Amino acid sequence: QVQLVESGGGLVQAGGSLRLSCAASGRTFSSYRMGWFRQAPGKEREFVAGINCTSGSTYYPDSLKVRFTISRDNAKNTVYLQMNSLKPEDTAVYYCAAKAYGGSYSEAKLYPYWGQGTQVTVSS
């Protein structure tokens, strides 16, 4: 069983930055595949970023790869999402997710473990 706890959300003005953290339980964190997703009210859950904690390879949708950066610290069992140049349309609940195996990073259904989410609100 993997437990994920997100933190770092909050209210920020457009153009600002936030760094989200996701702390994971478990002794095999370095073998996980981790993802960040977001969900705005009335919208479907959207893939934001993914990382292979073994190799460090990262994955992004084209629309976000310039402004968002995912990273990990295996010693701290933590994944980060650095978000820059934030826009009001980035407002959403951001979720961290984990899986033990490969496959597409953007498919939410492939992740069995999810955090509770952290709210990010970007004001104009």
Image (tube, rainbow, N blue to C red):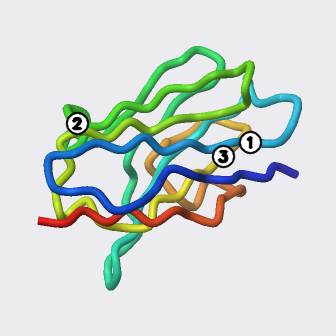
Percent from the top left, x then y, of residue 58?
43, 26
Instruction: Please name the residue that numbered disc 2 is placed on.
Output: 67
The reply to whether the C-beta atoms of the residues labelled 3 and 1 are less than 8 Å apart is yes
Q: Is residue 44 left or right of residue 61?
A: right
Q: Is residue 2 left or right of residue 105?
A: right
Residue at 79%, 52% (x, y): give it. 3
Report the label total: 3
Residue at 28%, 57% (x, y): give it. 12
Is label 3 or label 2 in front?
2
Tell me which amino acid carries mark 3.
Ala
* Residue lying furthest bottom: 42
5 lies above or below 22: below
Other residues around mark 1 within 10 Å, as few (<14) / some (14–19) / many (≥20): many
85 lies above or below 11: above
Percent from the top left, x then y, of residue 91?
29, 65
Sequence-first disc among 3 and 1:
1
Tell me which amino acid carries mark 2.
Arg
Instruction: Please name the residue that numbered disc 3 is placed on.
Output: 98
